[in-house]
Image (tube, rainbow, N blue to C red):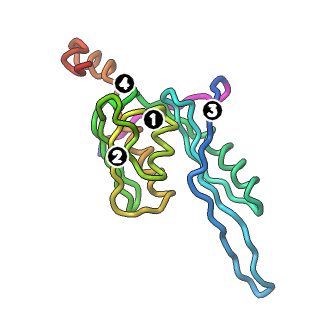
Amino acid sequence: MAKVNIKRVKSSEIEFKDRLVSIRRVTKVTKGGRTFSFSAIVVVGDENGVVGYGLGKAKEVTAAIAKGIDDAKKNLIRVPVMKSTLPHEQHGKYCGAYVFLKPAAPGTGVIAGGAMRAVLESVGVKDVLAKSKGSSNPHSVVKATINALIQMKDPYMVAQLRGIELSRVFNG
């Protein structure tokens, strides 16, 4: 697979909405008894092409979510969104999770399952068809979806690189 340039974004000047994807109770057993803690995976986005995910771990649920939000704001990427959908089809993979994203006609809505839906809605995509294959682990599905979104190419940049007009790259 070709090396991909990740488009990083600074979080200071953007208003974000956060979505809790998954929260799990983790038990550590020692000779002194059981110790409970929580891990939370959170997705933040401005619903205008910027998204990030983060993992937070703490002894309390609220602290785990807060840490996840802080981590997500450190890992932001910019995604090209064209007319409320994605510019082209894309596959993503992380460990055992495989995702497929496909642009859809206006009015279709977000046809995606749990973890993928949170990521796509945070990006600001309104019409998309998505399928998750393989592992259903929310951590892996979120990372595979982000992987697919990182690989998205902006039609304006593709037209400029090829030296042709936009209408030949993207019919819209």
Quadrant in which the C terminus is drawn: top left
Q: Residue at x 48, y 52 (%)?
A: 115
Q: Which residue is mark 3?
A: 16
Tell me, yes or no, whether the two marked residues, 2 and 4, touch with CB atoms within 8 Å. no
Residue 94 locus on image (x, y percent) = 40, 55
Amino acid bearing label 2: Ala
Q: Residue at x 30, y 22 (%)?
A: 155
Magenta span of residues: 2-12
> How many neighbours does mark 4 have within 10 angstroms: few (below 14), some (14-19), or many (20 or more)?
some
Q: Which residue is mark 1?
A: 6
Tell me, yes or no, whether the two marked residues, 3 and 2, touch with CB atoms within 8 Å. no
Which badge, 3 or 1, is on the more N-terminal residue?
Answer: 1
- Mark 3–mark 4 distance (CA, rounded to whole Å): 20 Å
Q: Residue at x 35, y 31 (%)?
A: 107
Q: Residue at x 42, y 52 (%)?
A: 113
Which badge, 2 or 4, is on the more N-terminal residue?
Answer: 4
| In this view, the mark in front (1 or 4) | 4
Tell me, yes or no, whether the two marked residues, 1 and 4, touch with CB atoms within 8 Å. no
- Mark 1–mark 4 distance (CA, rounded to whole Å): 19 Å
Q: Which residue is mark 4?
A: 82
Q: Which residue is mark 2?
A: 130
Instruction: Identify whether 106 is placed above or below 96.
Output: above
Quarter where residue 56 is shown: bottom right
Amino acid bearing label 1: Ile
Residue 50 locus on image (x, y percent) = 52, 31
- Mark 3–mark 2 distance (CA, rounded to whole Å): 23 Å
> How many neighbours does mark 1 have within 10 angstroms: few (below 14), some (14-19), or many (20 or more)?
some
